[in-house]
Image (cartoon, helix red, strand yellow):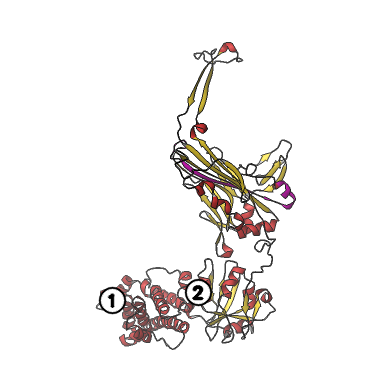
Amino acid sequence: MSKSWILQTKETRRTFETATWIPLRSSLSEEQGKVTDMSHSSEFFGCGSVAFPPEHLSLAEKLSWSDIGLSSTEPYAYKDGYYASIFEYQYNDKQPIGLRLVLDMPVPIIGGKKWVINPDLIAALRLIKEGNNWVRPEENFDIVIREKLDDNGEHTEIEIKKEYLQDYLAARNLSLKITYYRQRVENIPSLSNSSYAGLESHSEDRDGGRYELRINDIESIFGGGFAFFRTWRTDIDEDEDAPKMGPETNDNTDFERSSGYRGGFEGIRVEGEFWRDEWISHNNISKRIRGDFDDSLPQFIVDTDGSRLASSELNSEDVGRWLWFRSSIINEVIALRGFSFQWYTAETGGITSTSGYSIHFGLNLSDLITVYAYDIAKLPAWEQHIWAAKNVIPDGKISAELFEAQVKAKPASTQAVEVIFFEVMEMLDKYFQDTYKTSLFSTEIDRNEYSKQILRFESKDEPSILRLAKDLIRAFSDRINVSGLREISTHSNKNKLGSNKLLESILAEKIGSEKAREIFGPIAGTYDMRLGDSHPTSSSIQDAFKLAEIDENQSYLRQGKKLISNFAQAIWYIGKNLSETKDK
């Protein structure tokens, strides 16, 4: 080890006042070698905390490591009926002055202790536990509290993210005092031949705390004399059935005594200790719990000249403005955990976030997303910042279908091609089950999951529209029940045909090969595009686009929409022609 390690030079300069994570309780230790051996080294960090209201801060100033530290917490019922809750920190008996945010509770019978976070802290911040972390679903499942355990499952540390702690402290008008102690020890053969040469035992005030360095012979610490005493009774007959002892006297007792010296320990023990107290205060703002105004809210572009308005000015249903965003905002927000998405019409939909708010959006002629400004302004700050990053100057007017719904109160009766795609698959599958008593598909599909992949917004460039083609094939062709279709098909080479060709052969039996091939054109083209995703330099990609009936002069978003539409239309025509021939 080095001098800076034992002197804790770096550690004493760091304070938790500027840290992201604040320990509420810590007991971290590392140890190598037996404590009396010259190979021994160890490090310990302990931290305790109590939150105090303003009226008790003067008393709290007197408290330090020896008062708070890692003391255990238990409720206590006094004989006079007074009850001390486990949450209370008492200065004297029946004098509660503080609140514990972490409880150290002994476990009866089985032994050990269990650290428990104050339930009020969990409830106030609306946290849920995932593994060893407590997360806040309303803020993208951000980790708020971390619990650390050792190999035996015992707690070693509980720490909280500072911004959430301060929100809670502000809501309850509390200040948190943390007091901590760090010890480092190393045993060495001699001082002069070590990296600690020249050091002497001393004590000093440093960096707002107190540091002590102790250098001693190991013999002086662990060596020394000892005495052993044993006393026993002599007036009991062990053969009696029910022996009874009387009062103890010199006549019915005997004893023996021995003494000795335990020593022979060689080497020097170098020990550095540091104590410090810190206050974690709040800035009197509680955005999450008390709902205080958030001055970190973004501004949004609201007009064609690029002028902006603060979110707070848009947070009213009477503002009457819309905002424009790049279409990639849809991909970004629905990728967040806990967010859900649905289409309302062909060009409008809704996004519901973990905060519970729903955003009604529309897609305009310039491939921009338009949203009523108030719907954005009422979102939590972190969500607003995500939307603000995609905010652009108005272009292409408000989405026509969004305008119809929000201004004229006449929602369009159209359907999104993404919705139609899944519905026609279900219809075709039902036809096969009713007609052939077998399912068209060999596996079920997670529609919620696939709905986030089969989306026009996924098409941003050529590689991404090829990936969209792959997802369409995965959702349809790759799930086809090949073994079931081979039993239905009468094609002479059916055992060698793949999923699409098998289905095409069944359709061809009803309407002829040429017409079946024409209907399957978009599906075949999409399949070839899917192959292009694996081989992007393939010269056949352009032919695949033509076969899938995609106009490459359109924007990639419109190409993506057309790809889904043509694929869904092909599925619908398959079902339509099969059912019509059946009816005839």
Asked if residue 99 is positioned above or below residue 264 in the image, the reply reads: below
Q: Residues within 10 Å of mark 1 (few under 14, many from 20)?
A: some
Q: Amino acid at mark 2?
A: Asn
Q: Residue 27 appears at what percent x and percent y?
A: 54, 46
Residue carrying label 1 = 497
- Please state which of residues 167 and 197 is positioned toward the viewer in this rendering: 197
The residue at the point 66 percent across, 47 percent down is: 87
Foreground mark, 1 or 2?
A: 2
The residue at the point 50 percent across, 74 percent down is: 331
Asked if residue 97 is positioned above or below residue 36 in the image, the reply reads: below
Asked if residue 384 is positioned above or below residue 208 in the image, the reply reads: below
Callout 1–callout 2 Cβ contact below 8 Å: no
Q: Is residue 69 left or right of residue 5?
A: right
Q: Which stretch did the figure color magenta?
A: 35-59
- Please state which of residues 340 and 374 is positioned toward the viewer in this rendering: 374
Q: Earlier in the sequence, mark 1 or mark 2?
A: 2
| Residue 298, numbered circle | none
Q: Amino acid at mark 1?
A: Leu
Element at label 1: loop
Q: Residue 356 appears at what percent x and percent y?
A: 60, 67
Residue reaching furthest to the top:
251
